[in-house]
Image (cartoon, rainbow, N blue to C red):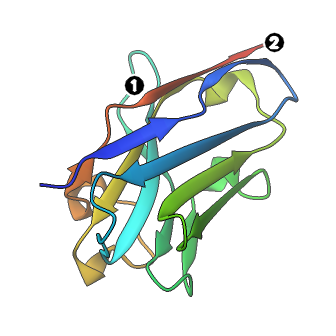
Amino acid sequence: QVQLVESGGGSVQAGGSLRLSCRPSVDSYNGACMGWFRQAPGKEREGVASIYHDGSTTTYADPVKSRFTISQDTMKNTLYLQMNNLQPEDTGMYYCAASPYNRCRGALRGVDFRYWGQGTQVTVAS
């Protein structure tokens, strides 16, 4: 069982930035994809961004394109989500996820991801 630990959430004003980090509990973990999902109060979970294990494919949800960047540091075995120009509608719990399935490539479907973190809260004030 792989556990994922997120960090980096917090509260910012609109227009601000945050960087989320996620690290698997197993240093040797090497799945097909890793990604970020979020869930706002009263709304369903939605995909934010994902990255294929070799970095060749990154996928973003339309609302975050040009503002968010997903990346990974293979030496540190850490996944990142750089979030710039944050807006109130970005508020929510952000979850790191990992997928062992190649079908995750280019997709942002929660069903394609097997392992999930506990989440880190992001709050953006207007």
- Determine which quarter of the picture holds residue 106: bottom left
- When the figure is inspected, residue 86 is found, relative to residue 102, above or below; the finding is above
Q: How many marks?
A: 2
- 41 or 57, which is in the foreground? 57
Left or right of residue 77: residue 65: right
Residue drawn at point x = 20 percent, y = 55 percent: 2
Residue type (three-letter) at the residue carrying disc 1: Lys
**52 or 43: which is nearer to us?**
52
Q: Determine the residue positioned at 78% across, 50% down.
A: 67
Hey, what amino acid is under mark 2? Ser
* The quarter of the displayed image where residue 57 is located: bottom right
Q: Which image quadrant: the C terminus?
A: top right
Mark closer to the chain start, 1 or 2: 1
Residue 82 place in picture, x, y as percent: 71, 49
Using the image, determine if residue 28 lies above or below residue 65: below
How far across and how far down the image is residue 109, in percent?
33, 59
Instruction: In this rendered view, identify the residue nearer to me: 126 or 16.
Output: 16
**Distance in Å between CA atoms under marks 1 and 2:** 20 Å
Left or right, residue 50 beside residue 27:
right
Relative side of 94 to 3, left or right: right
Q: For the point 26% across and 60% down, which residue is it?
A: 113
Residue 126: give its label: 2
Q: Position of residue 124 (x, y in %)?
A: 71, 19
Name the residue that disc number 1 marks. 43
Query: Element at badge 1?
Result: loop
At a point 28% along the width and 83% down the height, the residue shown is: 102
Query: Secondary structure under badge 2?
Result: loop
